Amino acid sequence: MLPVIGTFAPWTDPAVVQIGRLPAHTPLRGFRRRSLDGRWQLEMFESPDAVPATAIDGDRRRAVEVDVPGNWTMQDLDGFDDLPQYTNIQMPFAGPPPELPDRNPTGVFRRSFDVPKAWSSGRVVLGVDGAESVHAVYVNGDFVGYGTDSRLPSEYDVTAHVRPGQNELAIVVVKWSAHSYIEDQDQWWMGGLHRPVWIESRPSTHLADLPITTGYDAATGSGTVSLDAFVSFGGVPEAGWTVRATLFDPNGRQVGSPRTGDVPHEHARPYQFTGFSVAAEFAVKKAKPWSAERPDRYEVRVELIDRRGRSRHVESMLVGLRTIETRDRQLLVNGQPVWIFGVNRHDHHPDRGKAVTVDDIRDDLVAMRRLNISAIRTSHYPNRDEFYDLCDELGFYVIDESNIESHGYNWSVCDDARYRQAWVERGARMVQRDRNHPSVIIWSLGNESGYGVNHDALAGWIRRADPTRPLHYEDAIRIEGWDDGGRPATDLVCPMYPTIDEIRSYGERGVGDRPLILCEYSHAMGNSNGSLADYWDVIVATDGLQGGFLWEWKDHGLRQRLPDGSVRLAYGGQFGDVPHDCNFVADGLMSADLDPHPAAAELAWVYRPVVVTGDAATVASSGSVRVENRRSFSTLRDLRASVVAVGIDGELARRRWKVPAIAPHAAADVALPALPTDTVAVRIEWATAADTWFAPAGHLVAWDEVVVDADPTVPSPPGAQPPGELVTPELSLFRAPIDNDGFKLMPDLARRLRVGGQALATWQDAGVDRTDPERLVGHTVSVEHDATGTTYHHIVDVPPELADLPRVGVAFELPDGFDRTRWFGRGPGENYPDRNRGAMLGVWDGGIDPLPYLVPQEYGLRTDCRWFEIIDSSTGHTVRIEALDAPLHVSAVGYSAAELYDSASSFDLAPPARVIVHIDAAHRGLGTASCGPDVLDRYRLGAGTYEFTYRVTLPD
Ligand code: GAL
Ligand code: MG
């Protein structure tokens, strides 16, 4: 039984959110802090009730050593069974709230720490920055406090419990609690101390909180900074203490004179007493505002000065001067609309789980900016404090989300009074911690928790505490309607996974006054993100639509060592976890190791800051194109433009292109240099002129093309031979289902619950996945051999009952050794008919693509190819395919559709032993039906006749 609290079992009571915890506050860095991170003793128990008091007191017999920060679910527990478990909506154990399972893994973390003698005069505070799910703290055997909310720091005043020299600390972490029901986010359930633990000394009288509000007036160019310095007196409040605040501009120059104020000490007249706080205000003429494009920051230095004039505590805060408003269906930063080029980001690392380091966070941000991402929703909880510092410094707009999701009990917990306090505390404590960050432009009340009284209680608190930022909450508009629903809880219309038509309709109907920003869209599960560019065509063309946050940044694969010594990235169920939701956790734009999936290139293109448009006729006649600057505050001066003339055999010319300064949100017509006559497409590339924090100079930021010759002649290299027996194309109609076609590992979802894509079930019912395609459709082929090659002409008749096939094309095998590809078509990366707008025409060079997805599925296609070569680089042998009528889609991959279809993990596939070449006349789009709309009609394969012609040769 846990000492002191064991009989009350606060973890079973949703209404107990904390015991003995200090109030949340803006991060303060002016104290002497010692990190307690490192190796800790950990002893695991079957439940909190099974923890003997001796375990707290330091009986170490059964302890293992683990890393803090760390998730115990990711570390070696010497036989104790508690591995990661993945569920999406369902809770991992039976309810209803707040019922808990009997087995409730509980860890007693122990270490000793030193308290210097010099700390005796002040307060000693212990910080636990993140514990999943709840924790209790014991110092030298004394109970100190208890905290909930796994994603915000908890602080405890341990002065009365420590002594100079060595002290013993025990933190008991209980995995399942009444609060687990409101931490039911779609991610791995973990356990442990996943963020830093520290101890610090604070002077007995110190600054305890420093909320700062800033503003910027675009009309006058002036800014404001107002702060409240809250003082905590160690003993009886004394007279004579003052606070001095000084402001410095981004160049370190002092702005105006310091402001000084007396700390109130008397409150004999309680009615008038406003607290031990000093307010200060600064007006800044000619301010340098903060934005994600220009993240200039001012320093606010605040000193607490005692009655003898000595400075006793100094804090320095970096703030940004900026104003956020929603007005006339627009979200405005400093009076300007900004495009929300966003992604949803979870804390995730394949080895560390939720225990991400500051370097991990920085790596994410660098990789994001390389893809032109400038906005992040912290789905679905507040991050480590350093995340926001980095976003302030580097320039990202952030939706900061409260750690509240009760998805499994969507309709009840939000109205459950027992959870009211938890709702308010989670949101309020987030605001209290993060309010000084300019990057945080919107507060989110959480995710997928229905809409109830608890939400409005939290919204009311935030609106009063921080009127400077809008609120976000998706379920309020989902449940009450986009036009005017859920107003108390959300200032944005922030739907998830709507269709393009739905968002267009909201914009065009001109209803309401709220901007529409997609809180989640374009589900990146496996080979996905079809129609990303189609969403943005509508977003940029329609008033009231301003962008969104793609779901989601990274796969949550976890590195797992198997008994045979091999290592894989695991998804739900692969740890023996029951219940689980399988590979739905692998839905990132990046792999868990931060390798970009092919869709990343499309996203970077869709989010490009400069857009060039033109049509063939204009480019040919007047030679000019339209250049549009999509930034809100800066020109394109930091980018160098080049014009590339692309021919059927390669680049014909590449020239620097001088573009006049184009103001933010402005566009200009700019003349192109003269083009070589055999130009097929003109590509305009924009690269960084200088080294930046995210990439060396020359990093490609934006690109566009104008096709000037829609029907180029494909040359046949001289001296070619016919392919003979080497190439035997066979009809092919099936593709290894992508996650959007249907969850092959969770067939019940489509068939019984109608969840996710239905295409796979339809194909299975029609036998497309296993029947000889010649028996499914009408197919005639004529083959003509001549001295230099073989020409194939196919006519395929798709009957009405087989409409919406995966592909119509042919496939053949080449022996191992063919290891290179070259082609004229869209590239350089994998692309599909509804995800190829960012893939440009050109002559590209590649290898045989490795499978980029955790669950094997169709991959590797290149659309709109005029010719395609597969090359054995050791012998030079080449197989060349030439499209004779319309361009064709081609892939050269290491596995057949059947092999990919039959396999559940990319780690189960043997290394490729041959090359499978697909030539498709048509290929179904990707869509995002794993969570969202299926493929648009125009990217589907209707019934009817498909005719295609190509020639195969073996060039010299
Ligand atoms: C949303 C949810 C996310 C995630 C996503 C699907 O409904 O907010 O947390 O579950 O769907 O991957
Ligand atoms: Mg959910």
Image (spheres, grey):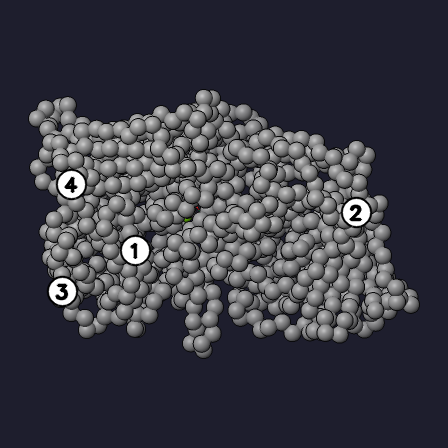
* Observer able to see residue 415: no
Q: Is residue 455 left or right of residue 693?
A: left
Q: Which mark is residue 57?
A: 3
Residue 852 drawn at (x, y percent): 57, 61
On screen, residue 796 above or below 54: above
Screen quadrant of the C terminus: bottom right
Q: Nearer the viewer, residue 950 or 343?
A: 343
Q: Residue at x 32, y 39 (%)?
A: 317
Tell me, yes or no, whether the two marked residues, 2 and 4, touch with CB atoms within 8 Å: no
Q: Which residue is mark 2?
A: 680
Q: Is residue 17 visible?
A: yes
Question: Could you tell me how far apart the alpha carbons at marks 3 and 1 are, in whole angstroms?
Answer: 22 Å
Q: Quadrant of residue 415?
A: top left
Q: Is residue 110 above or below residue 380?
A: below
* Residue neighbourhood size for the residue with mark 3, other residues' Cα within 10 Å, grouped as few (<14), some (14–19), many (≥20): some
Residue 182 screen position, x and y as percent? 32, 47
Number of other residues with Cα within 10 Å of mark 1, as a class: few under 14, some 14 to 19, many 20 or more:
many
Give, as a three-letter code, the residue at label 2. Val
Q: CA distance from mark 4 to mark 3?
A: 32 Å
**Can you tell me whether the CB of the residue at mark 4 lies under 8 Å from the nearest atom of ligand 1?**
no
Q: Which of label 3 and label 1 is nearer to you? A: 1
In which quarter of the view is residue 442 placed?
top left
Residue 205: mark: 4
According to the picture, the residue beneath numbered tag 1 turns out to be: 196
* Residue name at image x 15 percent, y 41 percent: 205
- Position of residue 111 in the picture relative to residue 691 (left or right): left
Give the residue type at disc 4. Answer: Thr
**Of callouts 4 and 1, which one flags the residue occurring earlier in the amino acid sequence?**
1
